[in-house]
Amino acid sequence: MGCSPGRMIVLVDSGSVFSFANLHRHYLGCRKGKRNTYNALRFEARQELNLLELAEALQNRSYRPSSSVCFVTQRPKMREIFAADFKDRIVHHVLVDELERYWEPVFIHDSYACRRGKGIHQAVARLRQFIRQGSGNGQQRLWYLQLDIKNYFMSIDKTVLFSLLKPHINSLDIMWLTKLLVFHDCTQDYFYKGRPGLLQQLPAHKSLLQAGSAKGLPIGNLNSQFFANVYLNALDQFVKHTLKCRYYLRYCDDFVLLSEDPQQLKLWRAQIMQFLAERLLLSLNDKRQKLRPVSDGIDFLGYIVRRDYTLVRKRVVNNLRAKLQGFEAQLLRQRRYYRVYLYDSEVVDALVACLASYLGHLSHADSFNLRQRIWQEFSFLEQYFQVDEAVNTLCRRRFDAAGLRTVLGQYRYFRRCFENEVLFFKVGRFIEFYHAADQSIAHYLGLQQLKPNRRGALWGFPVSMARHYLRMLVNAGWSVVCIIETGQYLSKIQERRVFCLVESF
């Protein structure tokens, strides 16, 4: 371990919340899923020294948050994100871990955002349970009131937030750090990353840059998510203990109340509006209020929730279709008499992540028919995946022969992957065939059998003739898979992978 010349780092209290051991523990948790990002790699390159310097800065209270990265997401809707530096995310984890020790037992059971063991799918399942219980399994009519806070993150008052946190902090270190992060204005030190002009297209009420220094929390940070839960915990307690609403749940600023009496729900709405205005300086979003019978279905967190089944929201399905259309444009080349499927590993990896995410979302709904329609509509997926409908997961076909150290072994591997296609298997400057079943192809192309060789190749032709022979086979109705060399070596043998599949139609 080293440090800059003439500089000594002194840790004043190894047992404190700001100790090296505690920071290292949260560093390990913070880097999960982020280890290959630029900021995480830069921090990891000198992690011990960075953690020692961070511990010292926290202990002597010279720590200040670094510059944030500002960018705008456009799906599912435009949002302004302020992403903290990796070092600051470690500090956020430290603080939230300490504050949760008091607040987690205080939060109501049916608050589902950004909490361990909670989440979107648990909230949807709980809402469906409420519908069944409140309606006596459909024996009586039930109504729902769905409300939403207007510009929630941009409207949080920092002074009110700190007043909610302060009485329950008994550590001077945590009090100092909480105050620092609550009142930190990230808009004073940030750099923008993204398409020029996109930030200006964001409505003023959705931008932290327009909220003023006394209002708003940045979207995208762990401490902001936790502070948002603390802020609305007051509302949760009011609804459960003052209004005595039995069926109530909240995910972030989206919450639902159920009752047999619609007039009761109207009264509760008026009382909630008054409470939010007086206690939390918030207001309801008039455009997002719904008072309807639950038989209409409740549009909640990407699902349409009913008593007996759950459907996926149309916007989610449209987003999936838009993303698959984008992948199809990158991977499929449509020609006049044939089509070409490309096997770009980066694009296919991104497709895997996208499909896995959406299939996970769809698996929590009654979506069998929907998944079948998606698979039929985007038939190009069949060239890259198989789907195990029994467990609703992707079975990705592997299209590289990683680890196989003989040419013949690699050929046999690809032959198993593509049993019904012709393999154009590149070896140096030649395309070679190794399987006796390829004799009909060789005969059609007019190839002469090769002399016995160490690789076991039976037929072949120069790469310069590949385009000509490819056209012959495709015109005759064959599908052809092109296997290329990657340039990476395993011992003396090059790795190989699929480049493309060409098929006629």
Image (cartoon, rainbow, N blue to C red):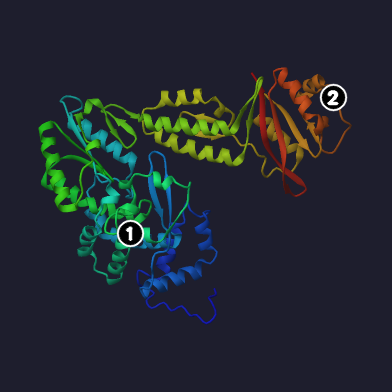
Q: Can residue 212 be seen in this view?
A: yes
> Which residue is situated farthest in the right direction here?
451
Q: Position of residue 501 (x, y in %)?
A: 66, 29
Residue 266 circle label: none
Is residue 392 depicted above or below 224 in this figure? Answer: above
Q: What element carries label 2?
A: loop
Q: Distance between the residues labelled 2 and 1?
A: 70 Å
Q: Where is residue 61 in the image (x, y as percent from the top left)?
A: 35, 73
Relative to 104, 92 lies left or right = right
Going from N to C along the chain, the mark reached first, 2 or 1, is 1
| Along the line of sight, the residue nearer the viewer: 36 or 160 | 160
| Along the line of sight, the residue nearer the viewer: 335 or 341 | 335
Relative to 8, 337 lies left or right = right
Q: Is residue 435 visible?
A: no
Residue 96 circle label: 1
State yes or no: discs 2 and 1 in contact (Cβ < 8 Å). no
Relative to 419, 147 lies left or right = left
Is residue 123 depicted above or below 297 in this figure? Answer: below
Is residue 218 depicted above or below 20 in this figure? Answer: above
Q: Position of residue 42 (x, y in %)?
A: 53, 61
Relative to 62, 233 lies left or right = left
Q: Name the residue under label 2.
A: 447
Residue pictured at 48% horizontal, 48% vertical: 194
How many numbered circles are shown? 2
Q: How crowded is mark 2: few (under 14 residues within 10 Å), some or many (20 or more)?
A: some
Type of the residue with mark 2? Leu
Quarter occupied by residue 385: top right
Q: How crowded is mark 1: few (under 14 residues within 10 Å), some or many (20 or more)?
A: some
